[in-house]
Structure formats: C-alpha cells, structure tokens
Amino acid sequence: KLRNVAVPFGVVPGQHFVPLDCNAQFSPCQSWTSMNLGDVIANTVTVPCGECWTLDIKDGSTLQLDAGIDIVGKLVIDPDANVTIVAPVILVQGEFFYEMPRALVTPENVGLTIRMTGTDILTFLPQAQNAAVCGTNTSIVIGQCEIGKKPIVVAGGKFTLKSWPDRTCPTWTRLYDTVSDPIIVPQLTPPDDPPAGCSYAVINETFPETPLIAKNIPPDNWYPTPGSRVAYSNVGGASNSSGYYIKSYRRQKEFMGVYYQVPQETLDCVSVNGTRYLFSARVRLTSTTSNSSLCSQGLAAGKYCIQVTMQSMDATGDTKFLLMYHQTADEGAFHQDGTWFWISNVFDLNPNVAAVDGAYNTILFSGPEGGIDISIDNVLLTRVTPDYYPDPEKICSNMAYLNGDAEKSLIFAYPVQTTNIKGSLMTIREETTANGTINKYFHMTGRAKDYCSPMILLEPKCLAIYGMYRFEARIRVLNGNEYTKPRMVVKVFSNDPTAVPPFEVRPVAFCKNQTESDGWVHCAAMTEFTEKEKEAAKLEFYIIVGTNQTIPGTNVTWDVDYDDLKVSLYKGPASGLVLHESVKNCWGPGSEIAVTSNTFNYSDSAKNVILNVTTDGAPAGQAIVYLQNPMRTHTTLESHPWYASEVVLLSRNTKFLSDMDDGANPQHGGHFIIFHTPNQTQILEGVEIRGYGQLGNLGRYPVHAHMCDNSPNMSISFNAVRDSFQRCYNIHNTHNATVQQNIAHNTIGHCFLFEDGSEQDNKWLYNLAMDTLNTPKDKLVTIIESDFQASSFWSATVENWMEGNVAAGSQDSGMWIEMLENVRGPSEQFYPGKNPSRAALKRYWKNVIHSSGREGLRLYPNGHYPDDGATYEDLWSFRNKGDGVLLFNSRWLTIKGGVYSDNRMQVEQDKHADRIHIEDIFMEGYSDSFRYQVEARPDVHSHCPVFRPLIGIQLHSYLRFRDSEGHRVHNITFQNFGETLTGCTGSVSISIDQEIDTGHHDAYTTFSNLTFQEGTPMSEKFEICTVTNHYVGNKAFEASKIARQSNYFRNDMMFQDMSGDLDPQNLHRPGFVV
C-alpha cells in the first residue's frame, strides 16, 4: 500500500475521508511486546481494521519500522511507554491514541519520540470505503494519494495525543523580574612589597630644622644648577610645622633650579619594572623683580611654569628623561606668586625612562623664567601604598569608589588618572557648597584635545557578561556660552596583539547640552558589558568634552571640572527568571526555554536551559526559574507593565523529530497533516515538533489541517514547533477548529496561517510565535505566496477568533491580514462570489505584537472594508521597525484601545483608507524603557534619527470613496513625541502624509479628547506644513503639479478640534485648524 512515486496525486475536489465501518467496535487490545515483532521490522506494519494494539515498550529502546506503519485499526501507546519510533511514514486511517500521565516537562520524563526518516515521495491506497477520494492516473496506479516524504498522515481516522502536564500550565508567560548572582569578589593581584629593608617612600623630605641652617648650607643631596644658588629658608611664610624649606634663587634662565642627587641607597629601593609611583611637593614662586611671574599671569604659553624632571644616564652614556610634573599655564594662573600650592603626579618607572643602575640620577625642579625664586617643601616620591589599591569586597559594586569623588586627598587624584595628553594637567580643588560644606573636585586645564579627561581604569575581573552598569559624573564646563554635549566613553583594549587599531572607543553615555552658565550638570546612563569588555586587556573610562562631538580629537582649550565619577553595577546578568507561579509544577529542570526580544530586532531573543524551579525567595504568586547560563536582562513587568518580554517553554515530553538525511534537500524535514477528514476528533496536545516542514514543497508543513471542512472537535494545543523549514500551524479550508497556547520558535515563512480565505469560526487563542524568518524568494511554494515577507500570524480572512496571541519577533511583519476579493487556492471553487475583504470580523482582541522588522499589524494591500464595520480591539503593538498598525485600502474600521509605542509610526492610516476611527489608545513615541536599552547597548538602535520621523498618528490627505464620513481621532494620550521631548528630528504626535491625489485635501477629520505631554510645543502636537513637499501621485499629474505650485493644497485643509486640544493658547476652546 505504500510505494514510491515521482508524480504527485491529489484528492478529487469535494471528497473527504470518512471513518471506517470496520472500526465500529475494536477487539481487546493486544500487547506489542507479546507479539514478538522485533525492534527492526523491514515490511510495512499494518494494524488491521477492528483490531487494537498497545505499544508497550518501556525500556527506552528504538523501534525501527523501515517501511512505516499503517494504522487501519487502533494503535494505543501505553501511558508509561518509553520508546523512539523511527519510520518513513505513519498513516492513520483508523485511530491513534496516546495519553501521557501528567508529568513535569523534563528530559527524564520524555515518553514517546517519533523520528521521521527517508527521502522518497510516498503514496498510499486508501481502504475500500474511501477508495473514491483520491484522483487517478492510469500510467502509475489508480486511486493513490500522494503524501510526500517523512509524513505523519491522518486520513479518515482519529488522532488523539495528549502529553501536556495540565491545561492550567502555561506554554509561555510574561517576564515578571530577574534575579542575579551576588556581586563578584575578584581575586586581585596585591601590590608588590618594597625590596627588603626599604619603605614605600623612597624620598620623603620635609626639610626639618638642622644646624646647617645657620651655616646657610643646603641639605644633603640637594644642589643648585650651575649659575644659581640654593639654601634653607623660612622667609615669607613657612609651608609646614618645622617652618623651613629650601629655596632656589639667583636664577637667570628657565632651566636653572634645584636638583636632588638620588643617593645609591635610595636607588637600591627603586624598581623600574613598571612599578607605579606617586610624586608630590609644595611649591611657591616668588618674583625678585617688579613683575609677577609669567606663569601666575597666565602668559607662560607652554613654558615658564614649574616642571619636575627625572634624569639619568645609562651604562652606554645615553641620557634618559622622565617628565614627572609639568604645570599648565591655566593652572599656573590659578596660583598667585607668593602662595604655596601642591603639585602632584603619578607615573610608572620602566627601563625606557629610567636607569637606576646608571649615573647622575637626579630630580630637577625648574621652569619659571629668570628672576623667579622657587621654594620647595614636602617632597614625596613613594610607591603606591596598599590603601590606594581596591578592596575586592567593594570594587565590583562601584569601580570608581576609591576616589571618584576626589575626596581622598587634596594632593593626589590617584587612583583616578588622566588620559595623559601632553600639556594637560589635573589637580584637586576645593569649593564651599551652598550648605557650607567643603567639596573637592577634579579640575582639568591645558586640554589640547576633547578627550583630555580624568581616566579610571576599570577592573575586567569585576565585569559580569550582560551585567548592566551605571556610569555617572558631574561635569562643569568653563566655556562661556558655547554649547557642548559631553559624552562618556570606555576605551576597550584588545588582547590580540595584531589588532588594528588595538582598541575600540565605545560610547556609554551622551550627556545634556550645557554651557558654563549651567554650572554643575549631572550625567548618567546605563550600559551593558559583553564578552568583548570582559576579555579586554585594559578598560579606560573617561569623558569627552569638545566643540564638535562628531570629530574625535578636536582641539579644545576649555577648562573642565569633574566630580562624583561612578561606575556602579546596577543589575547583574539574569541567573534566574521570576515568572508566574503556575510554571512551578510543569516546567522542569533540563527543559529549554526562550526569552523574546525586547528591541525591534527579533534576534535579540535568547535561549537557555532550566536548572531548577522554586518558589523559595520569590515574591508572592511568583516562582524563580534558575538558569544553566547567565543571560541578558530583558524588559520585565517590574520595570514596565506593558513592554515586558515573554518567556517560552520550548521542550515537551513527547517529541516529533526528523532525520536530516536528504542531502539534495537539507531543509526537508517531516510533516504532520490531517488530510480531508472532517467531523472527527483530532487532538494534538503537548508535542515538541522539531525540524519539520519542507522548504519549497507545497502543503508540507509541521502542522497542517488540510481541507477538513467542519472540525469542531479539532484541538491543536500546547505544542511547540521549533526550527521549522516551512511555516508552522496551517489551517486550510477547515472550520471551527481550536489552535490554542501553541509556541513557534525559529521558523521559516508565515507561521500561523488561515490559508485560503474560506476558513471560518476557528480560534487562535493565546499562541506565541517568535523568530519568524523570511522564505528565500526562490523557495516559495508558488509565485503568488508572500512568505518572502514572513509574518508570524498571517490570514487571508477575518472570520475567525484572534485573541490573546503574541507575535514576538519577526524578520518582517508581526500580523498580516492579506485578503483578496475572492477566496484563494483550491477552496475558491467552493465559495464562488465570496469576498473576504468585505467579511465581518469575528473577533480581534488583546493581541500583542513587538520586535518586528516591519509593521506590527498590517492590512495590506487590499485591506479590509466590511459592510457593517469592524473593531480591532486592545492591540499592544510596540518596538516594531515599521508601523504599529498599517491601514491600507480599508474602510469602516475602528482601532480601539491598547498601547502603541516605539514604532516608527504608531498608527499609519495610509491611502484609500476611509472612515477610520482611532480611539481610546495610549501612544508613546520613544519610551524611557526603550531608551534605556538603546543607551545601554551599542547594537540596539532606535527610530531616532532616521530618514522618516517618529510619529504618533499619520493621516492621509484624500479619501477613496466620496460618500465617506471621514476620520475620527478620539481619546488618545500622546507621550514622548516631538523633538523637544525626544531629541528625534521631525517627531510629531499627529501628521499628514505628503502624498496627494487630485490636489485637494478631502480627508475630513475630527479630533477630540487628545492629551499631550506637558512641555510639547504646538508645532510638535499637529504638523501639516511638510505636506507641501509632497510627491505627485499617479493620478491627475497636472492637477497635482498645479496645486503644488500654487500652494493650494495646503490652503484647503480643515480639521475640526471638538475639545480644543489644539488651541494654540491652551485654553481648550473648540475650533478648526485650517
């Protein structure tokens, strides 16, 4: 009965399979194992009509049916079976029955696995009672039905498979919250101790009182440069408690000064293997002439201010220099002559800049012009002491905790460093705050580049992949009235020595525009770290402030103040998901789950594996699902009640799998079809169907109800179609079926379908599709199909229930209602004159669409124009790249209730859309929740800026029917629209499409009860001025051209504002916009 054939055969139009009379009463069931059929059977296994067999293999073995099985009678799968059936075909002409005990979904509880195999196209010869159903072809075999390769076929029989734990158990739920592991406590390398017998400070000179003072002899190892003098002094005010210091005087040139000859015992304590040193000193400049020093006057111009240089000569006689400190002109001007001030710096000693085993190791203080005395005190050169190294218990909660607020010392900024641009200098300054306290902050002068900034080295060991970090700083620019927009960045150095360039500069925060008059401005933003940052050789955090933020490295001379730098762990990666407690008794360890995207890129979804599920520590009514691998935190109900991601259970305890054994057609898996069988009980419940569908083969889908007419007892529920090669759940000229709480993940082509436009009174209830991919154009089943623009839910009719479904990520549209003016395909002959586009909508309610690559809900190209009107209710459509809803060629429709957010346009009423009512809706242009994702991740983009602006409602300028009553926009709340609130160029709450037809505006529109966010300018509430830049339509070209030239088109617009919400004086007086 089963044979190979190269030519397909179809069913005679209008024919159906009927139940076999010989199955009116079954004999007592026989045990499969007692029949000793073996575990590898070469010939077709046939369960005879009227007989019942029980497949009771329970040892986890594989049953190899090389020629398949033909169930003419009844096959019962034992509830406790544990078996894998491998077959090229399973044909049900009688009855298939399997009801698995209610069990947690785990790999250990998998009972029945069916694995389809083979590459031959198969046919079957129906039983005599159904012999007339299939067509004929005398060149092959009369009456054969073609069923393709790897088929599971129900033809006249009953199919009952129930393996879902509990009908109250969800297949998906919304993400309530996430939990994270404790903050990392890293193993940090402690600082090297000084060499034996040495202290941290290698120079610590305070110039105490000694007998040398009376003899005017300088202290040991301090010498004047030739031509100058040096001596102890206490004239003009002491700098410390001893009252003494040394002074360099009779200086005639800027290179003259005082130097310290480093003694050998000190050199023995110095390390040049990259050891970090802190240097500081107290300095005072005193003029011996009538003029102040050039430095104090701000006239140093890159020289004549104090500088400190380390010099040494190596064994070859080469002199090496290290600039230990150089004061900028701006900083010098801050300190008047005769006043003491601190100088300090941090640097690393290495063989390139120092030769401690050489000769003439000196530290020279010089710089000011001749006639300026240099007084010096409190000279310190020390290794970085342990108190400057991070505490592992604290560093990972705030990587700038040690001195990000500048309060640790008035001398050293360390461990805050600088980006080390020549000529720039960072110092610590103090100010008295409004409440009388003293605040320290970082002051940066000599900024020759926009990236001259304090710099904090981030600790890669602290980073958690997918952890969310909050970057903060207070910034004060000293730039007069010129606006600047600071931004925070992280410089990520590659571990690859061959990388070009060796680093990547990643923005982490864009701050507000500010000028000097704004004073201190707080800037903060979130960012997410990934493997790239975790594996970096080094991470530097700094702040760019410049005149032109688009050209890095712009020359900038402004001084800038910084304070309160923080890099805090806001939320670690998700180690567990907080979900509704109903998952606890059915989602088990080892099962796979997926989390839907929370951006408008479907691929931002994620998969994971459950470790365990518990209510311990969970909020009331919730459970915690712990994960095998930490993952990115998606939008949760706790963070926003509308935009939360969904969590999907991908695994099931019963599996339909498919061998990938077709080398010529690697994307041809198995297919399950209920074939021309009306009025029978068909239950497919709780099955994981993976690798099914045959790309490019008509009618070969994972789940397919084909031409089954009235099927009120058909239930396709709680299943998971995964990795489908072609479509998912296809209802084709079948009525009254229920498709409920099914899942689809990573599938090709339209997913859930009502195929021909004839389907009526079916129910799509609370299904979810995610990661829906486009079909390649050369793999379409026919040239008239549109799967190359795949939609998660696609329908050629509206005469069905569509309730509570979620389209959670498609490469193209989320839901597409693509109706014609006639029924399509093989069903057309049974419905002559039927026009699906005019049919009454049965029910469209509480569906959710997000993360689509194009529109959310799309009525295109023929649209929907029912005779008695239709209402699409309570749709949530958000974070789609295109429109939330696109209405095209439609009439007498009401879009009522729901939430529309973060779409390019929330509702686009495109051309030939008449008598459209839009009412009772909340619309948000650029939500804070989405902005948070955009700012945190460089790979996430918003609608701002784009070539088409961010809009709430776009109305069209002309009607399709002259008797139309026009449009109504009522009770709409607009939030976060307009350039003022979003920063998105051209954004507006309501606009008019620029395309025209006859040169006149005839789309009559009334507005009422519109609510705009406080601070929205009138021009950003309703905008019609750009309509004069319209393009000319195909009709009435000359008329349109004349209208454009005369500006007549704009001049004959009129909109009625019934509640005064567009009153330019905000007095809410009803009126007209003309």
Image (cartoon, rainbow, N blue to C red):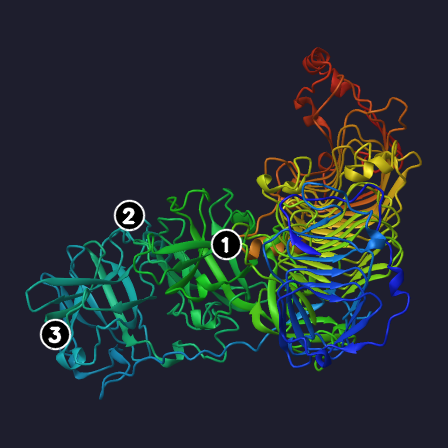
Among numbered discs 2 and 1, the one appearing first in the sequence = 2
Identity, as a three-letter code, of the amino acid under mark 3: Asp
* Helix, strand or loop for disc 2: loop
Q: Is residue 775 left or right of residue 1008?
A: left
Q: Residue at x 18, y 79 (%)?
A: 266
* Residue 617 percent coordinates (x, y): 70, 81
Q: Hey, what amino acid is under mark 1?
A: Arg
Foreground tag (2 vs 3)? 3
Q: Which mark is residue 476?
A: 1
Q: Secondary structure at mark 3?
A: loop
- Compared to residue 541, the image places residue 217 above or below, namely below
Circle 1 — which element? strand
- Between 707 and 139, the one lying in front of the other is 139
Q: Is residue 502 left or right of residue 407?
A: left
User: Picture quarter containing residue 68?
Assistant: bottom right
Q: Is residue 415 left or right of residue 863?
A: left
Horizontal and vertical percent position of residue 17: 84, 52
Q: Which numbered mark, 2 or 1, is in the foreground of this view?
A: 1
- Read off the residue under disc 2: 301
Q: For mark 3, does the 10 Å Cα neighbourhood hold few (<14), some (14 to 19), or many (20 or more) residues? A: some
Image position of 498 with respect to 344: above or below:
above
Q: Contact (CB < 8 A) between labels 2 and 1?
A: no
Location of the N terminus (image quadrant): bottom right
Quadrant in which the C terminus appears = top right
Q: Residues within 10 Å of mark 1 (few under 14, many from 20)?
A: many
Any part of residue 1013 in sight:
no
Question: Which residue bears the numbered disc 3?
Answer: 357
Name the residue: 45% across, 42% down. 548
Seen at 38% across and 46% down, the residue is 553
